[in-house]
Amino acid sequence: MNATPTLQHRYETFIFDSARWSKFTPRDGDIFVCTSYKAGTTWTQMICALLIHQSPDLPTPLNAMSRWLDMRTNAIDDVVAAFDAQTHRRVIKTHTPLDGLPYYENVEYVFCGREPRDVFMSSINHFDNMNMEAFGALLEKQGQEFTPPPELPEDINDRFALWMTQGVFDWEEDGVPFWSHFRHAQTFWDFQALPNIHFLHYADLKTDLDGEMRRLAGTLNIDIPEATWPSLVKAATFDEMKSNADNTAPDADKGVWKTNKRFFNRGANEQWRGALSDESLALYDKVSRARYPADLLDWLETGSLKAGYPK
């Protein structure tokens, strides 16, 4: 394995295209939020924005301040221009795995992990909440072709079987209809020794939001006055973000979600218990452990506070 990440793949889906990164010029101290889908992306963006601005009242809506650079529904020149106009420390959202991103030593990569079966459960609501007509209209307005994803089985266990056994890209073996949550995590896990690659976990944020926010602030070299912490932590809670969904959900002003509040559905862990069959759980164990490192799976399934790693 190389000492530093290298650009190996282009990730192009009906939603995003990693090739858009070629238009972006980084600045020292930029923060790239690099999570998989339904694994705490918007939560991590909000935490980073709160730490930077040190106020629960952000100067602009989160969905305008921390744009999803890969997302195809916004013209890349407009997205880059918006970032270039920012004078504060920038937070850039991406859903591209590390082997599809440019690697810069002068920026910080923040990856948030989540229990894979919870990601699957959350993705059902996410997929059903997508307004495909709005997605298509936005792309067609830019002269881009929109190819909607294939229809998925109604039965949750049939859908899970596809998610565990079929990939969208030639180099992936699971993740339909999006991409591999497991492999996405592994692309960062393999480079955890690098000083600018940092890890959060959804379960840890649920367990100790205050402590994890303080840890991340230290990691990013941001000093927060003690009296400011309670208001920042409150603003980063699930309920607060859901109540402000029109400002926090990605592209909330574009009509790409049937309802913005539903983007923040339940935010609960272990939703898969009692929902997935014994056969599905056996498939999960068999497939995941045959493909991915045991320590990565241990961390994804439990979080850093229980697994004791990574940093």
Image (cartoon, helix red, strand yellow):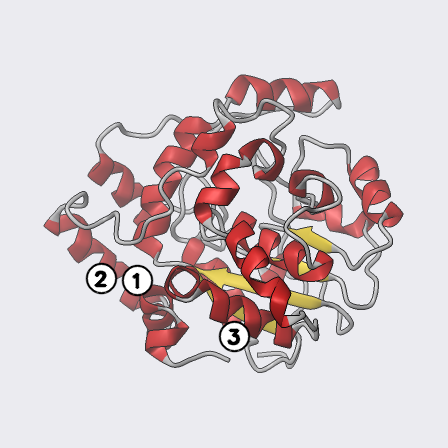
Question: Mark 3: which amino acid?
Answer: Asp
Residue 257 visible in the snapshot: yes
Labels 2 and 1 touching (C-beta < 8 A): yes
Q: Nearer the viewer, residue 56 or 105?
A: 56
Q: Position of 56 compared to 189: left or right?
A: right
Q: Secondary structure at mark 3?
A: loop
Q: Residue furthest front?
A: 227
Q: Position of 36 compared to 21: left or right?
A: left
Question: Mark 2: which amino acid?
Answer: Asp
Tally of numbered tags: 3
Question: Mark 1: which amino acid?
Answer: Ser
Labels 2 and 3 touching (C-beta < 8 A): no
* Residue 202 location (% of width, % of height): 42, 59
Give the residue drawn at x 67%, y 22%: 138
| Residue corresponding to mark 1 | 288
Q: Nearer the viewer, residue 137 or 169?
A: 137
Q: Quadrant of the N terminus?
A: bottom right
Nearer the N terminus, badge 2 or badge 3? 3
| Residue corresponding to mark 2 | 285
User: Hey, which quadrant is residue 82 in on the image?
Assistant: top right
Task: State the CA–CA distance, disc 3 to disc 1.
Answer: 17 Å
| Residue corresponding to mark 3 | 190
